Amino acid sequence: MKKTPKDHSRIADKTRLLLKFNYVSAFLSLLFGLACHYYMQVSPPIPYVFLGYSVLNLCNNIAFYKHRNLVAMAIVTSVLSLISTLIITMYSGGIQSPFIFVLAVIVLAGYISTSVFGKIYLYAILVIIGLIYLLTAGNFSWIVDGVPATSKDLFSLLSLTFSIYLMEGVFGRDLLKAHDKLFRTKQEVEAKIKEKENLLKEVHHRVKNNLQTISSLLSLQSRNIQDADIKKMLKSSQNRVIAMAMIHEMLYLREDSTQIDYGSYVRELVEHLVRSVKGTSANIDLDIDIPEMTFNIDTAIPLGLLVNEAVTNTLKYGILEDSKGQIFIRMRKGKQDDFELYIGDNGVGFSEETTHRNSKSLGLKLIHKLVRQLRGSLKRDASKKGTHYIIHFKEISDQLPSMAG
């Protein structure tokens, strides 16, 4: 698998941190070993272990520049640190040795390579500490304290300084840098997301403006046409364009520009259609019952066009002239991420023999094509007066299928 720039950056950070740990621990071990041998008169093998660890860790770093294997360097560092710490701990008082705190540093060094190594060293060191306690409590003869009584305080001070400096000076400082870097990256990502959201809103705004321009052109064109049927066709096309424009306008106004509140959209759309077809004094009652639910644009547009066609057909052919009428629209969510849309009216209806296949009505054909686009099913309820559709569909998120055919 090809590594990404982020992978290379993460590996580079781990390499830098491990190399720094090796150099710092080797230098401190050299100083600690010299102090043990020449100043504190600590008995062997403690001074030699410090000096040997310092030399071997430097060799480990040098070898890394040749083989460039981070995992290998991490394993050698951890094993070398573990063995050296165990020897020094066992020869400086066992469980009472202040140098035992360095074992915690080894766990951190293990986590540098991978979390697996870190967990292995964590549980292994917990077991080792338990064994050291048992061996110390058992007064085994080979557990000795090679630190003279006069040097115990200084040895404890240097041991604590050694472990604290490695934890805070190396890992702590790197952790702070990593936190700052993560915080800056988070700010950059949030800024980019905000920028993309603003761009997306601007796209919705421009699409809405363009669709409104098309609607205005259709309106201007219809004024110069005397044929009533053609004027109706242009008006229907204008309403379809407005139905799409309203979706983009709502997405532009919403904080979440990817989801549209479908209940408010349907109510606004149907009210517009009633005013457009029947006029402002229409005697139409709207019974719209859509609970709070949102859809993405891939679902909202065909679903909005479907409602547009069904309601337009009702207003044109179902509820005649100025007679009182009623339009019902309900939507419910099913059990398996499907939805049921019910659209009905109390108008005159049309024959059961009339279908989208034998009808010349473009609206009826569009309704069936839009249901297919939603990958749903449609059936008519002929037991009630008027026209009643029951539509089952699921939300779609991929590219919209073609309406051709």
Image (cartoon, grey):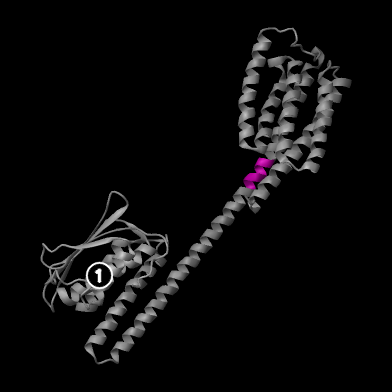
Q: Secondary structure at mark 1?
A: helix
Classify 393 as above or below 369: above
Which residue is the site of mark 1?
A: 270
Which quarter of the picture shows residue 130?
A: top right
- For the residue pair 188 and 376, the one nearer the viewer reads as 376
Q: Is residue 236 left or right of residue 171?
A: left
- For the residue pair 8 and 366, the one nearer the viewer reads as 366
Residue range corresponding to the magenta coloring: 174-180
Image coordinates of residue 263 in percent, x first then y, are: 29, 61
Image coordinates of residue 199 in percent, x first then y, are: 50, 67
> How many numbered callouts?
1
- For the residue pair 258 and 79, the one nearer the viewer reads as 79
Q: Quadrant of the C terminus?
A: bottom left
* Label 1 environment density (alpha carbons within 10 Å; few <14, some 14–19, many ≥20): many
Classify 237 as above or below 250: below
Which quarter of the picture shows residue 306?
A: bottom left
